[in-house]
Image (tube, rainbow, N blue to C red):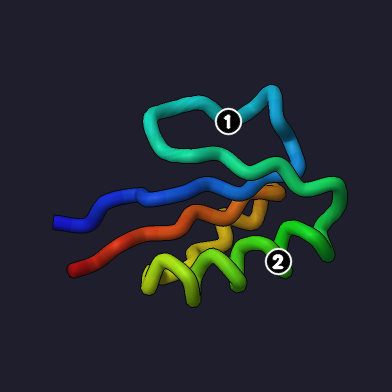
């Protein structure tokens, strides 16, 4: 079963939950942070197309 391991968003008031949440100042930082975390966490980044990217462990 897949598990959300992190959330990166440009909208701090719109995200909540049990996974670590990283707030980016703009979409450039959003992608930069998400793709760096993707490598560090060995996870898959999924862009929700609403200013939020989730990182999911599919193992």
Residue identified by numbered label 2: 31
Mark 1 surroundings: few (<14), some (14-19) or many (≥20) residues within 10 A: some
CA separation, marks 2 and 1? 17 Å
Residue identified by numbered label 1: 15
Q: Residue extending furthest left?
A: 1
Mark 2 surroundings: few (<14), some (14-19) or many (≥20) residues within 10 A: some
Residue sitting at x 71%, y 66%: 31
Q: How many marks?
A: 2
**Percent position (x, y) of residue 38?**
49, 70
Q: Is residue 44 left or right of residue 47?
A: left
Q: Is residue 11 left or right of residue 48?
A: right
Q: Looking at the figure, which quarter contains the C terminus? A: bottom left
Above/below status of 19 relative to 47: above
Residue sitting at x 61%, y 49%: 8
The local secondary structure at tag 2 comes to: helix
Residue sitting at x 70%, y 30%: 12
Above/below status of 38 relative to 26: below
Above/below status of 45 relative to 39: above
Question: Residue 5 got which mark?
Answer: none
Identify the image quadrant of residue 48. Answer: bottom right
**Percent position (x, y) of residue 34?**
61, 63
Viewer-closest of 27 and 48: 27
Q: Residue extending furthest front?
A: 40
**Percent position (x, y) of residue 49?**
64, 56
Q: Looking at the figure, which quarter contains the N terminus? A: bottom left
Q: Is residue 41 left or right of residue 35?
A: left
**Percent position (x, y) of residue 5?**
38, 50
């Amino acid at each position: 079963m897949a598990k959300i391991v992190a959330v990166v968003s440009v909208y701090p008031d719109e995200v909540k939950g049990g996974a670590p949440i990283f707030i980016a100042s703009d979409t450039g930082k959003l992608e930069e942070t998400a793709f760096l975390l993707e490598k560090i966490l060995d996870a898959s980044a999924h862009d929700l197309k609403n200013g939020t990217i989730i990182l999911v462990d599919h193992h």
